[in-house]
Image (cartoon, helix red, strand yellow):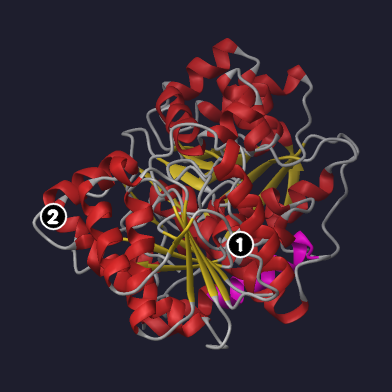
Amino acid sequence: MLTPPLYRAAGLRALEAAAGDQPLMQRAGRAAADLASTLLHDSQLPLLILAGPGNNGGDGFEAGMHLQQRFCDVRLVFAGDATKLPADAAAARQRFLAAGGRELKTIPEVANWGLIIDALFGIGLQRPIDGRYAEFIAAANALAACSGCPLLALDCPSGLDADTGAVRGSAIRASHTLTFIAGKPGLLTADGPDHCGELQLASLDLDAATLLAPEGETVARTLFADRLRPRLRNSHKGSNGSAGILGGAASMVGAAFLAGRAALQLGAGRVYLGLIEPEMPAFDTLQPELMLRSASSLLSTPLTALACGPGMGCDPAQVALIEQAAALNLPLLLDADALNLLAGDGNLKIAIATRKTATLLTPHPAEAARLLDCDVAAVQADRIAAACEIATQFNAQIALKGCGTVLATPDGRWRINTTGNPGMGSAGMGDVLSGIVIALLAQGWPAEVALAAGVHLHGAAADLLAHEAGEIGLCASETIPAARHLLNQWVANDE
């Protein structure tokens, strides 16, 4: 899996320019040929390279030359105009032809391919793919499926926006992607993971971060490693903070219970639930350590961190509760219906945006769309931009949930989390995440670090469970003990 740094297309172009005196295309082609050689399990089968009209096509020509020299049966299809190729790509084409390679205009009819290489379009795609190139993409996907062979994309699957992870018209669905120089955010979020397959990085002998400050990064344990330390023996429940959960309206008390159980099992010393349901239960039969109170009385309880939203409901009467919560001098996390109420109330927006203490918002795409007064498609079209806009607008730490959760800060920094799996698409997962994060906040973790660590840990717990029993049927409550296990394991390993 990729590690930081991450750059958008413009940053990558700047990196390429900064290293313009180095043979980057030759290095990319060799790296591609090396990986292709390991993926081509039957050297007797032909391999297909689809080369595009730009530098990504040049990478394909360069890879084709190396594979030709290794006695592979290379069939390279180039439908562009050789006279319009960039200089480096044109030189790579000449090297391929000089090595004995043949350039085809159409995909030959072959019964069984050993490998298909996508070198049509890389980063910086500006328009939807159509016409002949769309036909090539459809053919590559179909031929790989029919032959049961790997489909290797160079730098970025053609048709996938490397900045956003959005598909532009049609896109290669690769089994493997070899990306060059540094990571691209679009490979890690939105539709990117579904089109990239197994992702590998070839740095091309560049240390990108020394040439240009990273625009973003992936979330890694190094971000919060200094917090992974064992507790002092001379500690007590008061040492580990008091977490509050405000929510649990009629028929949705379970959401508050999930958040509370997660907060308790992830280390908060005390956990109080402020339930909106007037006929609330006396205690949680599965977690009797939780202390249940009315919503109003929770707000007068001494707390070190507070989450609002799990099972809260969208009754406008709850806005007053969130306003009272916003006035408290402690870290405040808003999720679920608290976000929906926030989106519809101008005064509450001001109250949240002008808080002096840490605020954290954890919207899914629909909630983010309400906060930004747009539609879900607009949010998903550029998840990084959407997360950063919400962070700025509300002066808050943001986790825009989804495939490749995007974390953004009010000063414009962003990260992408790479843990988690489709099994997390089930009820209650957001409530558990709120509980995990509020537990870390209650224990004194800084807001930015607590949010990133909570998202990363929750996804890792789901990955652990999926590895053991599969993704289908994964329940939110299962991730709580798994997250506890992993956190303690990380502390022990770091120690």
- Identity of the amino acid at label 1? Gly
The residue beneath circle 2 is: 19
Badge 2: residue crowd in 10 Å (few <14, some 14–19, many ≥20):
some
Region of the chain picked out in magenta, as a range: 474-486
Q: Give the vertical position of 352 relative to 212 (above or below).
A: above
The x and y percentages for residue 469 are: 77, 78
| Sooner in the amino-acid sequence: mark 2 or mark 1 | 2
Residue 126 shown in magenta:
no
Q: Give the vertical position of 367 relative to 191 (above or below).
A: above
- Identity of the amino acid at label 2? Ala
Q: Give the vertical position of 113 relative to 156 (above or below).
A: below
Front in this rendered view, residue 109 or 397: 109
The x and y percentages for residue 302 are: 54, 43
Q: Quick check: 10 left or right of 269?
A: left
Separation of residues labelled 2 and 1 (CA atoms): 35 Å
Could you tell me which quadrant the C terminus lies in? bottom left
**Residue 420 — which label?**
1
The x and y percentages for residue 430 are: 68, 49
The x and y percentages for residue 30 are: 30, 74
Residue 482 shown in magenta:
yes
Prevailing secondary structure of the magenta residues: helix
Q: Quick check: 343 left or right of 476?
A: left
Front in this rendered view, residue 331 or 182: 182
Q: Secondary structure at mark 1?
A: loop
Q: Quick check: 188 left or right of 401?
A: left
**Residue 53 — which label?**
none
Front in this rendered view, residue 145 or 109: 109
Foreground label between 2 and 1? 2
Front in this rendered view, residue 372 or 75: 75
